[in-house]
Amino acid sequence: MFTLAEVASLNDIQPTYRILKPWWDVFMDYLAVVMLMVAIFAGTMQLTKDQVVCLPVLQSTVNSKAQPSASGKADFTTVETTTDSLGRKTNLDFQQYVFINQMCYHLALPWYSKYFPYLVLIHTIILIVSSNFWFKYPKTCSKIEHFVSILGKCFESPWTTKALSETACEDSEENKQRLTGAQSLPKYVSTSSDEGSPSASTPMITKSGFKFSADKPMIEVPSVTILDKKDGEQAKALFEKVRKFRAHVEDSDLIYKLYVGQTVIKTVKFIFILCYTANFVNTISFEHICNPKVEHLIGYTQFECTHNMAYMLKKLLISYISLICVYGFICLYTLFWLFRIPLKEYSFEKVREESSFSDIPDVKNDFAFLLHMVDQYDQLYSKRFGVFLSEVSENKLREISLNHEWTFEKLRQHVSRNAQDKQELHLFMLSGVPDAVFDLTDLDVLKLELIPEAKIPAKISQMTNLQELHLCHCPAKVEQTAFSFLRDHLRCLHVKFTDVAEIPAWVYLLKNLRELYLIGNLNSENNKMIGLESLRELRHLKILHVKSNLTKIPPNITDVAPHLTKLVIHNDGTKLVVLNSLKKMTNVAELELQNCELERIPHAIFSLSNLQELDLKSNSIRTIEEIISFQHLKRLTCLKLWHNKIVNIPSSITHIKNLESLYLSNNKLESLPAAVFSLQKLRCLDVSYNSIALIPVEIGLLQNLQHFHITGNKVDTLPKQLFKCVKLRTLSLGQNCITSIPDKVSQLLQLTHLELKGNCLDRLPATLGQCQLLRKSGLVVEDHLFDALPSEVKEVLNQDTSIPFANGI
């Protein structure tokens, strides 16, 4: 027989699972234990005391005496004569009674009287297994175990206590005022202090949150006490676990179906047990008639037997029926509960009403069912668990952890000086913008990169020196007061994005903005979405830099054409076809069209009468015959045609009389025409990386030339006229075929940079020492050539290192 401990192990559920066992499951477990005890008690009694006692039924005394002796051995079977209760002889000995008792136990006793305890045991085991199968089945057990583990950690996490306590501290009247005041704010300004997340289509419009009126002081949300670092990290991990668990469990309803299935099985089992037990309850009786059909052995045909356990078994059976009825009613109630409400949907409406976490999402399927089961244990579990489903709660935690980690002292250490000698702070891949940033009041440049939850609060108004802001993949939200400050003080804004929808809408309303840099995808389909039509509000915009993949210049850019002085378009290899809108930009002084796959100089450029600098770098221009039209651009002083496919320079270039800088590097030039050297105002000429073999003697005509670059060509000799350009400060002759440098190089008294590396030189002229401004740092040659110079020349060239050293002493 099974012991109670052995059978009870079937019902051994981990203590942590008790939160998923409602009162009816707990009650049914106790009923099952009582039924087990009944089965074990009845079985024990039946094994130790169950028996029947039988006596023969005498037909008549005559029949008894007239029994003939079947053989000569008849007398030996009745050696010991017995009598019945009336004193009548029965002619049966003790062994014969034992035989009859055993035989009649199997023949006369009903099967239900013999197997009742074992049936109770089997039924109870089936009911126990049915009650807890969902805890054991692998596909549900793993989810339940994971859920219980996360739920326990969420319940005990210090973050839930702090978050809910902060919620309790908030005044409901203040929340109403905030929500009411939000109706009057412009839609382009997002002033949510702790809610919402950027979306792909409308990144700057939040779902909901605390709004601040422009003419009312901002109401601060109570700050949450700083968590211990370990607690904060655990809370962050819990948010991620809850997010993944929800995605894993919400897509199926297996747990719900399994629980419904096992409840149906228990109900069917109850009905089955009740039906057949009610029929057999009356078969358990004290008296039974037995006809063993062994008359040839004992001489009697009928016996009357008594079952000594009948009374006890009947009482136990009645108790068992009572228990199973109670069990069945509970099963029926469970089914009623399962189908009365939609358990595959769970709403956190009450939690949202009682807290500021209005974004807690409703859940469905198995996730919802598990929460419904937990509510039967204690609704506080679901309330505390909901904190980890809220993005607002997660953002608050990130904000607290961020501010705890990035203190004012740490941020001060990351401030550096940029090339413009401005104080700059670059924040990269943070969960948000630390509050301490806005205490750096002397900051000039702020760069925010890959910070999707960036929020600019009103505190930015104390950064009076801030004039430049970089938003790199960072669709920042701003509060009303912060926007007012940026609108009045910000001068330069860089926005780098993947999709045009990431550009913050408030960018186009910064009326005092001077420079705007847009870097990202602005293809023809997205041009309809781009907010450049709002650029007309930027009345002080002077510089517009667009690095994208445009097929045409958006007509809306011409809305700011009267204000622009510099337009830069870097097109990343996409062919720029339509350029007619350039004609309207009459005030543009600098124009860059780089990497636009242009094959000729656009005619629209010739209408820009105020153009001073033109840069057509990295295109596919092969001929520049249209250059004659540049004679109408009286103010053009710089022309950059580098990194193209230009083969020759037309003589009409002489008409650009005011040209001061000409860049033709990285083309396919084989010669320099004399017309180039008629540009008397030319100060910079760059023809590096072509196929030029000869420097014309006419170069001596360029008396104002200060920078001459002819690196990477095929020049083998230097004309003496080159050294008549006495104003030369930079002379780049590297990577050519030059064999010697004339001594007349000493005439270049203003020379500060001389590149000779990569030629066929045997020596350097000693007259280099007479170039008073030339130092070793500006002399680019092979080491052995420098070492071969006379010591006095090297001493002169090394003065730039020795003088500071001496001054230091």
Image: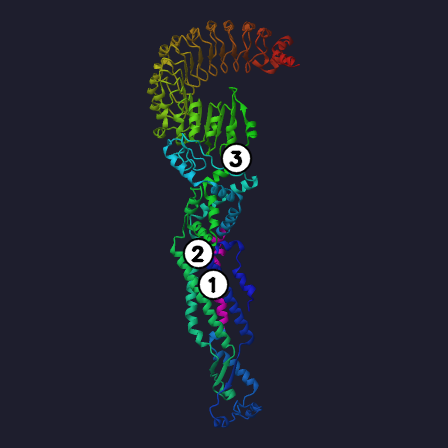
Query: Closer to the N terminus: mark 3 or mark 1?
Result: 1
What is the crowding at mark 2: few (fewer than 14 residues within 10 Å), some, or many (at least 20)? some
Magenta-highlighted stretch: main secondary structure? helix
Q: Which mark is residue 555?
A: none
Highlighted magenta segment, given as a residue range: 115-142
Q: Which amino acid, mark 1?
A: Leu
Q: How far apart are marks 2 and 1 (CA)?
A: 15 Å
Mark nearer the N terminus (2 vs 1): 1
Q: Nearer the viewer, mark 3 or mark 2?
A: 3
The numbered dot on residue 127 is 1
Residue 157 position within the rendered picture, expressed as x and y whole percent measured from the top left: 53, 45
**Residue 694, image x and y in percent?**
48, 10
Q: Can the viewer see residue 478 in this picture?
A: no
Residue 361 falls in which quadrant of the image?
top left
Residue 167 drawn above or below residue 534: below
Please give the label number shown on residue 258.
2
Q: Mark on residue 402?
A: 3
Q: Assess whether mark 1 and mark 2 are in contact (beta carbons under 8 angstroms).
A: no
Look at label 3 and name its amino acid: Leu
